[in-house]
Image (spheres, grey):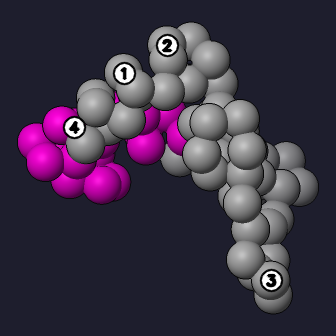
Amino acid sequence: MFGHSIYVRKGYHLSKPKLAHELVHVLQIERACLDKVVSLHFSDLAQYGYNDAPLEVEAFEANRNYSQSW
């Protein structure tokens, strides 16, 4: 994912939960701007780690929601 684009490598299975996760990241960029989100995300990754970084926590919630409904 980068900006308003989600890139998927050939052969990668993009399930609905994974797509929902990436769409949350697009939404996060729309709420702020790309530069701010990238800066914040790298800072959060260093402070909290990947699984506990706030932007990832929000996106992982979408994974869980769509995993349960599909």
Mark 3 lies on residue: 10
Give the camera-side residue of 34 and 11: 34
Give the camera-side residue of 49 and 10: 10
Instruction: Say whether residue 56 is visible.
Output: yes
Prevailing secondary structure of the magenta residues:
helix
Spatial separation of the CA atoms under disc 2 and disc 3? 30 Å
Q: Which mark is residue 44?
A: 4
The question of residue 56 being in magenta is answered with yes
User: Where does the image place residue 50, in percent across and percent down from the top left?
Assistant: 30, 55
Q: What residue appears at the point 53 percent right and 46 percent down from the top-left corner? A: 60
Q: Earlier in the sequence, mark 3 or mark 4?
A: 3
Spatial separation of the CA atoms under disc 1 and disc 2? 7 Å
Query: Is the residue 68 above or below the residue 9 in the image?
Result: above
Q: Which residue is most to the left?
A: 47
From the viewer's perspective, tell me whether residue 46 is left or right of residue 25. left
Q: Secondary structure at mark 1?
A: helix
Q: Which residue is most to the top?
A: 31
Q: What residue appears at the point 60 percent right and 45 percent down from the top-left corner? A: 2
Q: Earlier in the sequence, mark 2 or mark 4?
A: 2
Q: Three-letter amino acid code at disc 1?
A: Lys
| Residue 54, quarter of the rendered image | top left
Q: Three-letter amino acid code at disc 2?
A: Ala
Circle nearer the viewer, 2 or 4: 2
Mark 2 lies on residue: 32
Q: Residues within 10 Å of mark 3 (few under 14, many from 20)?
A: few
Instruction: Say whether residue 21 is visible.
Output: no
User: Where does the image place residue 35, in percent across and percent down from the top left?
Assistant: 40, 26
Mark 1 lies on residue: 36
Residue range corresponding to the magenta coloring = 43-59
Q: Residues within 10 Å of mark 2 (few under 14, many from 20)?
A: few
